[in-house]
Image (tube, rainbow, N blue to C red):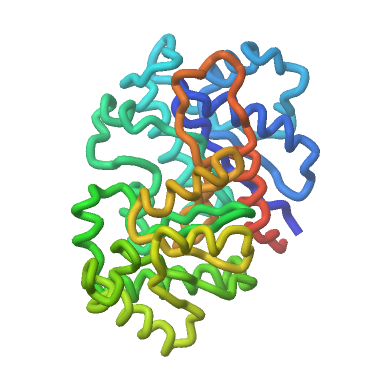
C-alpha cells in the first residue's frame, strides 16, 4: 500500500495563503498516513518561513516542492498585483494538471485574490471553482463543518442571475449529482433539506411562486428516485434547524443564502469543497486577508481542517 499524496497550492503570494500553509504543515508534521507536495515558489515560502521564524519547525525534508518560479524579482504583500495573480494561477493550474494525471491524489488550495487574477489578465475566471467547472461541468461548491454542511446550487453569480437559474431540470440534475457524490464520499449523510427561495418558502404562493412551480416538483422527482430530500423550508429557520445535525446537508439556492449562516457559525473551522471531480479538492473558507498579510497573526485552523478533510476523503492507494 502506498501513501496518498496531498497537493497544496500556496495561493496569492501577497495574502495569508503562504503563512497558513506553513503553519498548517507544521501542525500536521507528524501525520504519517499521507505525503505532502507544495506547488509554489521557494522565494515566497522562504520569506514567509523567515518571517515566522519557523526554519527549524517546518518539515521541509518531508514535503516535496514543485518549484514554480515567481514571475518577477520581488513580490508585494498586502495588496493585489499582476505578478501575484500570475503566480497563484500558475500554482493552481499546475496542481490541477498533476491531480488529473494522478500524481497527486487530492488538492488543497490556499486563498487566491480575484483582483490579482484580473490584473494578470485572467478576466473570465472568478476563482478556483469556475476553473474546475470548465473541465468538470458537474462540479458543486460545498461547505463542510461539524456544525453545518451546505451545498450551493449557484455561487458566484449576481442575485438576479442566480434567481433566473432556478429551473426544474437544473435543480433535478444538481440534487442527483450531489446525492451521488455524497453516497461515495460520506454515506452517513441521510437527510438533504432544501431552503426555499422566497420569504417563508413562498407561503403557498403569497410571497412568490418559484417553490410551487419549480422547487417542489424538482424535489418530488428525486424523492421518487429514492433520495432522502425534503423541503423547501423557510430560509430563516432551516439553517438553525440543521445546526449540529451531522447527517444533514442544507441545499442553499444562491451564494449568500448559504454562506452567511455558514461563515457566521464556522468561519475559523469551515472547509470549502468542490464535489463532482475525480479527485478531492478542499480549501479554507476565508480569503487572502490582505489587511493582516505578513504580520504572522493569521489563524491556520481552516487550512488545517481543509487538509484533514482532504486526507479523510482520499483513499489509500493499493500497490
Q: Is residue 257 above or below residue 249?
A: above
Residue in front for this viewpoint, 30 or 300: 300
Residue in front for this viewpoint, 50 or 99: 50
Residue 240 in the figure: left or right of residue 153? right
Quarter of image, res 268: top right
Q: Is residue 31 above or below residue 236?
A: above
Residue 144 in the figure: left or right of residue 29? left
- Quadrant holding the C terminus: bottom right
Q: Residue at x 44, y 38 (%)?
A: 92
Q: Is residue 6 above or below residue 211?
A: above
- Quadrant holding the N terminus: bottom right
Q: Residue at x 43, y 10 (%)?
A: 74
Q: Is residue 165 visible?
A: yes
**Residue furthest to the bottom:** 224
Q: Is residue 69 visible?
A: no
Place of residue 112 in the rendered image (x, y in percent of width and height, measured from the top left):
42, 33
Q: Residue at x 73, y 37 (%)?
A: 28
Total residue callouts: 0
Place of residue 221 in the rendered image (x, y in percent of width and height, measured from the top left):
36, 85
Residue 149 in the figure: left or right of residue 215? right
Place of residue 315 in the rendered image (x, y in percent of width and height, measured from the top left):
66, 61
Place of residue 204 in the rendered image (x, y in percent of width and height, measured from the top left):
28, 77
Residue in front for this viewpoint, 155 or 51: 155
Q: Residue at x 38, y 48 (%)?
A: 129
Amino acid at each position: 500500500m502506498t501513501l496518498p499524496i496531498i497537493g497544496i497550492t500556496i495561493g496569492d503570494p501577497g495574502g495569508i495563503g503562504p503563512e497558513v500553509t506553513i503553519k498548517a504543515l507544521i501542525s500536521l508534521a507528524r501525520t504519517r498516513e499521507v505525503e505532502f507536495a507544495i506547488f509554489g515558489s521557494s522565494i515566497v515560502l522562504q520569506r514567509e518561513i523567515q518571517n515566522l521564524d519557523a526554519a527549524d519547525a517546518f518539515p521541509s525534508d518531508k514535503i516535496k516542492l514543485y518549484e514554480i518560479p515567481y514571475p518577477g524579482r520581488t513580490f508585494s504583500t498586502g495588496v493585489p498585483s499582476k505578478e501575484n495573480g500570475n503566480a497563484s494561477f500558475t500554482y493552481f493550474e499546475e496542481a490541477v494538471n498533476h491531480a488529473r494525471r494522478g500524481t497527486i491524489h487530492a488538492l488543497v488550495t490556499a486563498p487566491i485574490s480575484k483582483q490579482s487574477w484580473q490584473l494578470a489578465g485572467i478576466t473570465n475566471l472568478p476563482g478556483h471553482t469556475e476553473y474546475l467547472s470548465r473541465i468538470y461541468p458537474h462540479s458543486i461548491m460545498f461547505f463542510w463543518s461539524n456544525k453545518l454542511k451546505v451545498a450551493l446550487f449557484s455561487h458566484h453569480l449576481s442575485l438576479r442571475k442566480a434567481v433566473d437559474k432556478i429551473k426544474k431540470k437544473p435543480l433535478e440534475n444538481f440534487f442527483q449529482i450531489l446525492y451521488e457524490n455524497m453516497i461515495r464520499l460520506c454515506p452517513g449523510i441521510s437527510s438533504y433539506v432544501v431552503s426555499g427561495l422566497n420569504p417563508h418558502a413562498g407561503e403557498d404562493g403569497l410571497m412568490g411562486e418559484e417553490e410551487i412551480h419549480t422547487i417542489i416538483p424538482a424535489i418530488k422527482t428525486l424523492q421518487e428516485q429514492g433520495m432522502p430530500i425534503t423541503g423547501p423550508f423557510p430560509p430563516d429557520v432551516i439553517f438553525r434547524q440543521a445546526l449540529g445535525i451531522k447527517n444533514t446537508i442544507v441545499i442553499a439556492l444562491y451564494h449568500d443564502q448559504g454562506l452567511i449562516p455558514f461563515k457566521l457559525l464556522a468561519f475559523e473551522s469551515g472547509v470549502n469543497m468542490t464535489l463532482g471531480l475525480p479527485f478531492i479538492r478542499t480549501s479554507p473558507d476565508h480569503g487572502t486577508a490582505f489587511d493582516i498579510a505578513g504580520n504572522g497573526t493569521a489563524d491556520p485552523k481552516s487550512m488545517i481542517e481543509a487538509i484533514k478533510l482532504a486526507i479523510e476523503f482520499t483513499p489509500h492507494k493499493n500497490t
